Image (cartoon, helix red, strand yellow):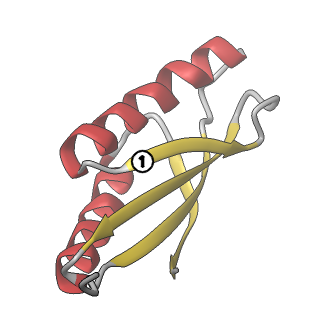
Amino acid sequence: MSEHTFFITLLTIEMIIPHAQSLKDKRSVIRGLKDRISSKFNASVAEVGYQDKWQRAVLAVSLVGGDKRQLESNSDRINCLCAEFSNLEIVSIVQEWL
């Protein structure tokens, strides 16, 4: 069996959705961000924290690929995409390599 090199990175994005007045409002904003990240970067995205809070959320974004530089570039672009999303405020974005 031949050996294949691949890289996995995990972004943990903590955010505040200041205008959400219900879980429905929050999920609408989160769904838009998740869909955009997932389709644009072929990433796996899941809400992993504060599911019961109206104005807080944590998303986990997983990227897998054979080119580490491309994954780093995509991570930077995801950071920019989150910063441009007007319906939320980013508290922190943490990147880990697995």
Percent across and percent down for residue 50 are 77, 41
**In the image, residue 16 above or below residue 22:** below
Identify which residue is drawn at 49% across, 68% down.
Answer: 10
Coordinates of residue 78 in the picture (x, y in percent) = 31, 59
Location of the N terminus (image quadrant):
bottom left
Residue 35 location in percent, x, y? 34, 32
The residue under the point 34% across, 66% down is 64
Residue at image mark 1: 44
> Callout 1: 10 Å neighbours few (<14), some, many (20+)?
some
Judged left or right of residue 42, residue 56 is right
Q: In front: 88, or 33?
A: 33
Residue at 27 percent across and 79 percent down: it is 72
Say which quarter of the image contains residue 13: bottom right
Q: Quadrant of residue 23?
A: top right
Residue at the farthest front position = 1
Picture residue at 50% right of the left edge, 19% below the top: 28
Taking 96 as reference, is 29 above or below it?
above
Q: Position of residue 29 (x, y in %)?
A: 48, 27
Direction from residue 73 to residue 56 in the image, left or right: right
| Mark 1 secondary-structure assignment | strand
Residue type beneath disc 1? Ser
Name the foreground residue: 18 vs 23. Answer: 23
- Please count the marks in the image: 1
